[in-house]
Amino acid sequence: MDKFLIRESFYNSIRFIEPPAVRLAVYDTLFDVGIKGENHLNEFPISDRDKALARLPLRHILLSVSEANERYKNSVKYGREGGLKGGKLGGRGNKKEDRELNVENDKK
């Protein structure tokens, strides 16, 4: 993915993490996963205790990011497939057709 959405809830979950080195590790990990799809939290020079602290907000945030990325990929995939199949592109529709369907449904 070349982009991802940062929600206000992500910011609120991270902004009070102390020490700042842990907060930086969380932000860097969030951006790495969101953009590159890679998690490098274990490579940061912080203690195991601090890594455990960093994993608390990341667990929920990264789940949300990965689900959003999956939804985006599916929308692109199925939107493209729909276009290749010659699907309708939207619009106002055929008013005459709609009236005929309503009349037929009323008769049933």
Image (tube, helix red, strand yellow):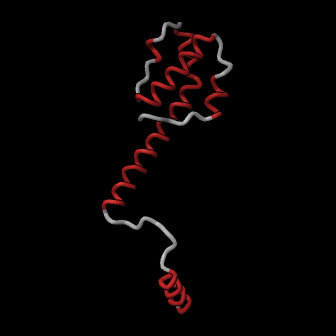
The x and y percentages for residue 17 are: 65, 17
Q: Residue at x 49, y 7 (%)?
A: 45
Furthest toward the bottom, the residue is: 107
Left or right of 33? Residue 106 is right
Q: Residue at x 45, y 27 (%)?
A: 33
Q: Residue at x 51, y 20 (%)?
A: 28
Judging depth in this view, the residue of 81 and 67 nearest the camera is 81
Furthest toward the front, the residue is: 91
Res. 79 image quadrant? bottom left
Judging depth in this view, the residue of 49 and 6 nearest the camera is 6
Q: Residue at x 66, y 22 (%)?
A: 15
Left or right of 12? Residue 91 is left
As displayed, is residue 6 above or below residue 101?
above
As displayed, is residue 92 above or below residue 17?
below
Left or right of 87? Residue 97 is right
Res. 49 image quadrant? top right
- Please state, as top left, top right, bottom left or bottom right, where the N terminus lies in the image: top left
The x and y percentages for residue 107 are: 54, 92
As displayed, is residue 27 above or below residue 88?
above
The x and y percentages for residue 77 are: 36, 50
Res. 102 image quadrant? bottom right
The x and y percentages for residue 14 are: 63, 23
Figure disc tally? 0
